[in-house]
Image (cartoon, rainbow, N blue to C red):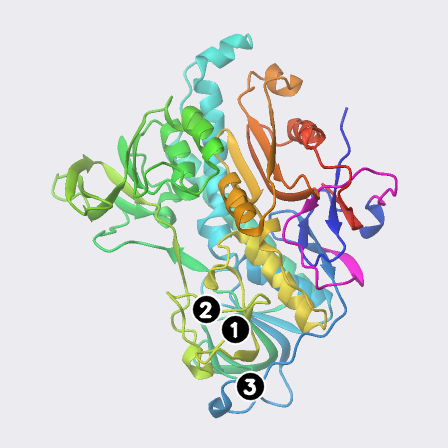
Amino acid sequence: MQSSLSLSFSQGSSAVALAPRSRLSPDSLPLASPAAPASLRFCRLRREALGFSSLRKSGCGASGSVLVASQNRAPGRVSASASDNGSAPKSFDYDLVIIGAGVGGHGAALNAVEMGLKTAIIEGDVVGGTCVNRGCVPSKALLAVSGRMRELQSDHHLKALGLQVAAAGYDRQAVADHANNLASKIRNNLTNSMKALGVDILTGVGTVLGPQKVKYGKDNVITAKDIIIATGSVPFVPRGIEVDGKTVITSDHALKLESVPDWIAIVGSGYIGLEFSDVYTALGSEVTFIEALDQLMPGFDPEIGKLAQRVLINPRKIDYHTGVFASKITPAKDGKPVTIELIDAKTKEPKDTLEVDAALIATGRAPFTQGLGLENVNVVTQRGFVPVDERMRVIDANGNLVPHLYCIGDANGKMMLAHAASAQGISVVEQVTGKDHVLNHLSIPAACFTHPEISMVGLTEPQAREKAEKEGFEVSVAKTSFKANTKALAENEGEGLAKLIYRPDNGEILGEIKYAVHAHPTLSEVVDELFKSAKVHSQAPSPVSEPVAV
């Protein structure tokens, strides 16, 4: 039986709430029951917003639907900060121009048209950006293959189910074609969706010429009442690493799957490195992780990280070096292998030298903001990121807001996830149409699509306890596993854990983390048990105004 569950926002929320993939309308949301017990509510909800004027549905790229709660309050006035950069035109070619057609720019464009704005989007490469062409989409295609391979290679698992399968194999080029074809399909879908709604797609590199003025291509100049920068990011390659695109590669190259090396070193054990280790080991490679910090998966909740290491790392052909930097990596050449020189991360003393067939650099991403013409509006980037305030408004070198200029997604560095870029874009469109909106980034989910998968939203347990110590409140943790879940046991996939981090005094949810094979229906049942086990003090206030179904 499928259980029903709702998470309630406190009254002051102006956060974006994530909804399931099934489209919800405001009328379909359940009403809060006055007799219900104290409710769990999302963390860091803004109290200065005193009421909602609307709750409407908007698309959020490939990440599902987003319900945007907005308030009718005009944003605070901003004064021009670059008076010597020319005056803004009095009439405009467009209401909104977006530089960059990734998932952030695409979501903003569709939402802008829905709000009645004449909109153009400028793209110097291909529609879809990193996520569609060199990130989320092709990686999911490769991970789908690795998941099937793992199932077919697990003799013990298959035998327990009464199945007998001959040795599994794969066609590397066909696998690569599957990833490329999926990216092409999604890219065409995004392009067609914008064309169908009347978004002008302008080809060429976009540059900010001055207030409300943009150049694209060689000499095409247009004006817009508001401008959004959504140029995304590129793989970050540390100094001392020589990338040749064949034996020393970034995720951009790896997604083409031009080869499956016998032994590959992966520098970095975050989301990117972990997912590629899943792909490569399923296809027969041996993997060596190189991690600068003292433990693998440093960005994950420690408890989930330990469980993930026990399942995703230890049983597979993976070894690792922690607490070391790859100070120099030289590509394979003239019959010699790839060489990797390791130094101690703290003392910088030489530690070891590895010789491998290939190396994947998965050390994160860097903002793609060069050549944007930011100097024309007196903006100086910070480590490459465009400085913005909590409303994504660009800040100039003097600390003043640049009127009518916004930056979303990886280029501003607030949260380098496709989900965040989409939500930020929708938030900006809310603002330029007269509705003040501040995005709650702690409501943006993240996921690592390994087998099993890891998903999270909000704070990890150590982050929550640090916050509690500073602000003087208590933290409680509710946990449940998949070992008693019928669906998981039926598939011999009982390894899994879900944990809820919350405040018992008022029911505020600080974080939720899941590690499991199944997203649905198993997950919904386990989350139901998780919420039932969370104990909120009966006297806790429950200022509920808008419950959101999940």
Q: Which circle's residue, 1 or 3, is located before the other in the chain?
A: 3
Look at label 2 and name its amino acid: Val
* Of callouts 1 and 2, the N-terminal one: 2
Counting every numbered tag in the picture gives 3
Q: Position of residue 364 (x, y in %)?
A: 38, 50
The relative height of residue 62 versus residue 399 in the rendered view (above or below) is: above
Q: Amino acid at mark 3?
A: Ala
Residue at image coords 69%, 66%: 430
Q: Residue 80 got which mark?
A: 3
Closer to the camera, 122 or 468?
Answer: 468
Helix, strand, or loop for circle 2? Answer: loop
Q: Residues within 10 Å of mark 3 (few under 14, many from 20)?
A: some
Residue occupied by mark 2: 386
In the image, the segment drawn in magenta is 30-57
Task: Reply above or below: 514 against 495.
Answer: below
| Residue 51 sits inside the magenta stretch | yes
Q: Is residue 217 left or right of residue 506?
A: left
Asked whether the residues under the numbered discs 1 and 2 touch, taking CB atoms below 8 Å apart as contact, a structural biologist would say yes
Q: Position of residue 512 (x, y in %)?
A: 60, 39
Q: Nearer the viewer, residue 304 or 431?
A: 304
- Residue 394 is marked as 1
- Find numbered disc 3 in the image and state the secondary structure of the residue it sits on: loop
Q: CA distance from mark 1 to mark 2?
A: 7 Å
The 10 Å Cα crowd at callout 2, few under 14, some 14 to 19, many 20 or more, is many
Residue 41 covered by magenta stretch:
yes
Tell me the crowding category of disc 1: few under 14, some 14 to 19, or many 20 or more residues within 10 angstroms, Cα based. Answer: many
Q: Residue at x 67, y 59 (%)?
A: 46
Residue 202 position (above or below residue 482): below
* Disc 1 residue type (three-letter): Val
